[in-house]
Amino acid sequence: MPKFTFTFTSTCRAFRIGKPVRVFAISDIHIDFKENKQWLHNLSQTDYKADMLILAGDVSDSPQLLEEAFQELKKRFSEVLYVNGNHDLWVRRGKEKSSLRKFCHLKKIARDQGIRMKPSHFGPLSVVPLFGWYDYSFGHPSADILRRWADYSFCKWPDNFDEAKITRYFISMNETALTIRNQHVISFSHFLPRIDLMPIYIPPKKRQLYPVLGSALLEQQIRKLAPQIHIYGHSHVNRQVFKENTLYVNNAFGYPYETRITAKKLYCVLDV
């Protein structure tokens, strides 16, 4: 294995694995919106040929648009690693009537397009997707959220599945990856693993969403895995913050009107 260095810079972390490589992160690209889809198609087809992309969920609930996004990203990046978000499991259109079947379908789409949804190893670097959902670890949803949160209408689960069981279903998929040890590890999830990743300036009205942002069970798994960097999405609030020796990064593209809390561009987390 070649010698390499690992240093912190203001915008990314750097290491050497024997060939030039950058790792970019983004989530919540929501290409159902024409502006977001146009951004995707406008990405350079030459600048990222040697690079990897971590795509932390919420691409589209349309299987056709999901496949299109995967195809476009694979034209641009040497590797694309993906974990699904909640929107990706909506079944409001298309043939799928179950969110569990939709999950199986999107895994097949990813596999067919060469998109990685399993732990992947690149010399001294391991990249680990962590599946999840929300289980009200961060508070109980208000009556308003129970009435308005779209997942309650557009996701379809077996009759005996509540939010806690949905979360355990996805969380259990991560267990075998928690023993991965490498010189450098990046993990990523769509859902938040801890509520203190949300900045203090979030207004009380927006904090009603906290119960449906993620699960503390994810954080327990992250502690076992001990990554240097964890990428997450879902909150649409771009942020980079250190917590217990892990750099947590949210780089959501977000909805077209979310220009104050999102950067609308790729974020480099690793660079040689």
Image: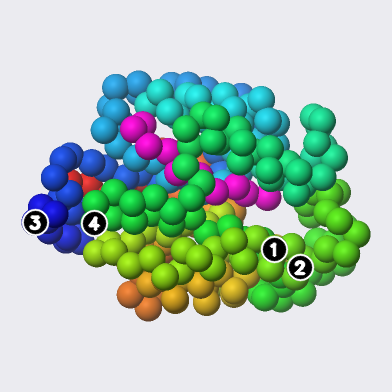
Depth check, front residue: 173 or 46: 173
Q: Is residue 239 left or right of residue 256?
A: left
- Asked if disc 2 and disc 4 are in contact, CB closer than 8 Å, the reply is no
Question: Residue 256 at x, y = what percent?
Answer: 58, 35
The local secondary structure at tag 1 comes to helix
Residue designated by label 3: 3
Real-space Cα separation, disc 2 to disc 4, in angstroms: 35 Å
Looking at the image, the residue that sits furthest to the right is: 159
The type of residue carrying mark 2 is: Lys
Residue designated by label 1: 169
Residue designated by label 2: 165
Using a 10 Å C-alpha cutoff, classify the residue at mark 3 as few (fewer than 14 neighbours), some (14 to 19) or many (20 or more).
few
Q: Residue at x 44, y 76 (%)?
A: 223
The image quarter in which residue 214 lies: bottom right
Q: Earlier in the sequence, mark 3 or mark 2?
A: 3
Q: Is residue 243 at all visible to an observer of this figure?
A: yes
Real-space Cα separation, disc 4 to disc 1, in angstroms: 30 Å
- Asked if disc 2 and disc 1 are in contact, CB closer than 8 Å, the reply is yes
The type of residue carrying mark 4 is: Pro
The image quarter in which residue 265 lies: top left
The type of residue carrying mark 1 is: Tyr
Q: Residue at x 70, y 31 (%)?
A: 62
Task: Classify 204 as above or below 108.
Answer: below
Real-space Cα separation, disc 3 to disc 1, in angstroms: 40 Å
Looking at the image, the residue that sits furthest to the left is: 3
Using a 10 Å C-alpha cutoff, classify the residue at mark 1 as few (fewer than 14 neighbours), some (14 to 19) or many (20 or more).
some
Question: Residue 184 at x, y = what percent?
Answer: 27, 62
